[in-house]
Image (spheres, rainbow, N blue to C red):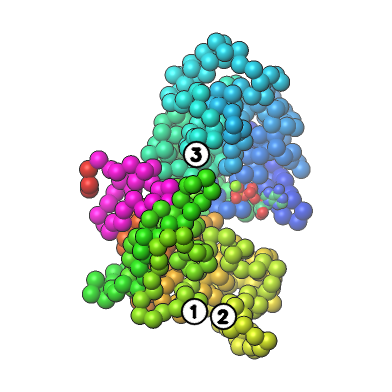
Amino acid sequence: MKNRQEYLRLQNISKSFGSVLANDDVSLSFCRGEIHAILGENGSGKSTLMNILSGIYTPDSGNISIDGVLHSILSPREALALGIGMIHQHFKLVDSFTATENIIAGRSGSLFLDSGKDRKIIKDLCLQYGFSIEPDKKVQDMSISERQMVEILKALYRGADVLILDEPTAVLTPQEIESLFAILENMRKLGCLIILISHKLQEVLSYSNRVTVLRKGRYIATVETERTNASELAELMIGHVIDLDIPWVETKAEQKTCLVEVDHISVLGPHHKNLLDDVSFSIFSHEILGIAGIAGSGQKELCEVLSGMRRVDFGTVILKEGHRFGTDIGFVPEDRLGMGLAGGLNITDNILLRSYRLTPGPFVDRRNGRKKAHEIVDRYSISTPGIDQVVKRLSGGNIQKVLLGREIDRNPIFLITAYPVRGLDVGSSQFIYGKLNEEKQKGVAVLFVGEDLDVLLAFCDRIAVLFEGRLMGIFDTGAITKEAVGMLMMGCQPCSRP
Ligand code: ADP
Ligand code: MG
């Protein structure tokens, strides 16, 4: 590392959006031949800074130099001309085009294949960097990982030797993550600069050479990956020391009783595809059942069916011991300010909202609602000017605490949570894990739909894997490996049971 030469420099970059200072006087530099991670919590300014480098935003002040020469980058096209390409969180491919057509589209206005020549260039790029793509497959038939590969090839085809990836692994299985980084490592070895935006500590530690940490729009530090560790990085990210262990609490097998029975349920979707396809399993008291799967595998539909918000086309969901759907189930949906809370209402009204639905009628007990709101704000340490604050003005972590607080306050026997820590800082995430564990110890059956397999395996008692609406299996988390879960997430049975 010490021998590496500075290649690209951002100097005193500031950028605000209205009253939000997204980047505050940030300076840092990158070298060729490194994977340089930009690490920071949600909202710390990572995407904004990299959007400036890739010509999507212009900075309010500051400058960019490449090889010692100042450049103003006014558009993505100008960035590409300087060799800078960015892979966004949402891909920008044409669904009805093939891989090859997408890769060459937009190049000098021509859509038509100069078949021989273009195919040769793409084939050579694939060989050089280790891609395996099917050139004539249409994007609409591709997995998310294949689409991402096409995006990367497209940038390379246009001459990028600086590749910025914005949270590229959020949508991938562990195996797909391995293949992605194998390719990025090849690019690095051939002298490219890879900039990896991430908020995942383990990923940054496993795959980067250097890490720059941003916090609240400011530059905090750049460290060599091999000389740092998870707790140091977490401290740089959030500004104070934090316990990173995900707490698992033991509950006794003899305490567990079946509370919910899911019996051969199916939900039909468009084009004769089942959103849920003949799914059966049981959920017990005193347990946290994790649900794993790549995005869109039926998690959303499952939560909606279990919460009673959606009908099944076949099968039944049975709540045991005379419990009722309306009152005995808590639901923290993925879509917090849509299905969960009403963003435009204040904390008190959001708490009352649940009881309006339960006891329809003209009388609303506002006094009791305000009392509850105060209790929840206290108990969950929600930082807000008061209970009359409009919910959408709260930060993500505090919004989630209002939602979880309201649902837990109703003493459910079954608590459904979808991605409850998504986008939250480490401190708020730990708080939420603690609350869910408390519920489990009280005897509640907790469903935890998650995306981070390390978290699912550490935190849950059992894990169920969904693939294209089908249940691939349920396992004790102590009896299955991350790799095996990854295989099931792609629809394959692992070759040998662990
Ligand atoms: P990160 O990528 O680290 O999560 P971002 O760069 O996306 O952070 O956001 C930094 C801050 O700037 C956040 O407070 C965000 O809400 C705000 N922000 C980002 N883009 C815009 C935009 N186009 N308009 C208004 N505010 C924005
Ligand atoms: Mg971002």
Q: Which mark is residue 117?
A: none
Q: Amino acid at mark 2?
A: Leu
Q: Position of residue 67 (x, y in %)?
A: 63, 24
Mark with earlier residue (2, 1): 1
Q: Which residue is the site of mark 3?
A: 144
Ligand 1 neighbours mark 1 (CB distance < 8 Å): no
* Residue at x 33% of width, y 62% of height: 281
Q: Is residue 387 above or below residue 35?
A: below
According to the picture, the residue beneath numbered tag 2 turns out to be 358
Give the answer, above or below, for where 202 lies relative to 185.
below
Q: In terms of secondary structure, where does tag 2 sit?
A: helix
Q: Amino acid at mark 1?
A: Thr
Segment tinted magenta in the rendering: 467-495
Do the CB atoms of the residues marked 2 and 1 lie less than 8 Å apart?
Answer: yes
Residue 332 in view in this figure: no
Q: Nearer the viewer, mark 3 or mark 1?
A: 1
Mark number for residue 327? 1
From the top left corner, tell me how far across and down residue 44 is, in percent.
61, 51
Q: Amino acid at mark 3?
A: Ile
Please give the name of the residue rendered at 59% of the width and 31% of the height, measured from the top-left corner: 96
